[in-house]
């Protein structure tokens, strides 16, 4: 069947991999043109990373801040305080934030890709006002994330529009819940995050869908494949590369999510509580409000290592989908 040919083509591309040095020799001009950008990115990322790692081994607080990288060296004490010291001001909150971030990231990843996939399939069909629908659905992505946090923070208030709609208008809930305190905080964070992230993922998936030739679907219909088989054997395999990149973006974005939560609770200075505190808000608060810069840097390094592990797992799972033919 034709959709088996698609699988065979992907295997053939896998067998045509060439080494990095060979690609550089074959594309000297291209690599020469992107060299300045590569150097710039290395400097922009490498220097802050090295500085942060050095800070994580120092006793850097409000008293030693003037010394900066010459502050007293304390070895792994900052890491021990985070991971093992029950008296540390950051330890309990850090593990609460780690748990919340894992829950937040998993739910957002699944729902964003699921909703975006559904919308992309619908927008890939021909219907009246399709262009208008695409434009309207892209609107949340245009709004800056800190504005999203402020707007949804007002909407989640006890007397905000969400409670008025759910309780006063449609009587879906018997009483007005407190969305910004207690266990409901996670819901208040997840929904605006999904609302803002879905349009971009939808756009990427829609672009991928439009690159799939109609002949594949016509051939699979002739072979007797139903709608589910066409989706599973044609659409998904040809969109795996797009999906893999969106999953990677999701892993990084949700772990480092900050703006929406920070602006929703106190316009950048608030505390979402133990049910809604994420890693970045926790580290930011401990670093810049409690002035524990060394401990904050150590927490950042721990998060970076966790993200690197997640990216390594992602690469192991999707490495075959990243092959590009020369």
Image (cartoon, rainbow, N blue to C red):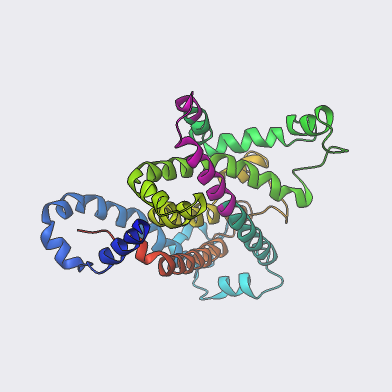
- Considering the whole magenta stretch, tell me its main secondary structure: helix
Residue extending farthest to the right is 174
The tally of labels here is 0
| Residue 94 point in image, percent of width and height | 64, 63
118 in magenta: yes
Instruction: Report the front residue among 58 and 230.
Output: 230
Side of 261 where 233 appears, left or right: left
The residue nearer to you, when weighing 246 against 295, is 246
Q: Is residue 213 visible?
A: no
Question: Is 275 a magenta residue?
Answer: no
For residue 112, say whether it is visible: yes
Residue shown at the point (54%, 43%) measured from the top left: 118
Q: Quadrant of the N terminus?
A: bottom left
Camera-side residue: 270 or 207? 207
Q: Residue at x 20, y 66 (%)?
A: 20
Q: Where is residue 269 drawn, in percent x and y?
A: 64, 44
Horizontal side, residue 86 vs residue 66: left or right = right
x and y percentages locating residue 59 in the rendered image: 54, 67
Point out residue 309 in the picture as x, y percentages from the top left corner: 47, 69
Say whether residue 62 is left or right of residue 40. right
In which image quadrant can residue 315 be found?
bottom left
Instruction: Please tell me which residue lies in front, 324 or 237.
Output: 237
Q: Give the magenta part as a residue range.
A: 109-133
In which quadrant of the rendered image does the C terminus lie?
Answer: bottom left
Q: Residue at x 68, y 62 (%)?
A: 96
Relative to 164, say whether 109 is above or below.
Answer: below
Q: Is residue 183 above or below residue 306?
A: above
């Amino acid at each position: 069947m034709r959709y088996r040919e698609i699988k065979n083509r992907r295997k053939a591309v896998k067998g045509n991999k060439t080494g990095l040095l060979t690609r550089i020799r074959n594309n000297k001009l291209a690599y020469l043109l992107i060299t300045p950008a590569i150097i710039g990115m290395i400097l922009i990322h490498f220097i802050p990373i090295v500085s942060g790692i050095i800070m994580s081994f120092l006793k850097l607080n409000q008293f030693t801040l003037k010394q900066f990288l010459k502050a007293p060296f304390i070895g792994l004490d900052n890491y021990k305080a985070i991971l093992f010291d029950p008296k540390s001001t950051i330890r309990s909150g850090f593990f609460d934030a780690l748990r919340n971030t894992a829950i937040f990231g998993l739910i957002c990843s699944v729902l964003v890709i699921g909703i975006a996939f559904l919308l992309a399939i619908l927008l890939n069909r021909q219907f009246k006002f399709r262009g208008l629908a695409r434009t309207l659905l892209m609107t949340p992505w245009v709004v800056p994330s800190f504005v999203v946090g402020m707007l949804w923070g007002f909407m989640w208030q006890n007397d905000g529009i969400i409670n008025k709609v759910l309780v006063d208008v449609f009587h879906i809930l018997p009483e007005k819940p407190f969305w910004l305190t207690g266990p409901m905080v996670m819901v208040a964070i997840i929904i605006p995050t999904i609302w803002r992230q879905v349009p971009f993922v939808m756009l990427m998936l829609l672009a991928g869908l439009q690159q799939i030739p109609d002949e594949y679907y016509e051939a699979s219909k002739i072979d007797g494949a139903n709608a589910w088989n066409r989706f599973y054997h044609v659409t998904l395999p040809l969109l795996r590369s797009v999906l893999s990149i969106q999953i990677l973006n999701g892993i990084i974005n949700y772990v480092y999510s900050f703006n929406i939560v920070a602006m929703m609770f106190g316009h950048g200075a608030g505390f979402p509580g133990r049910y809604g505190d994420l890693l970045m808000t926790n580290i930011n608060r401990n670093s810049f409000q409690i002035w524990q810069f060394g401990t904050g840097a150590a927490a950042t390094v721990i998060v970076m290592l966790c993200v690197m592990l997640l990216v390594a797992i992602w690469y192991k799972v999707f490495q075959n989908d990243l092959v590009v033919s020369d």
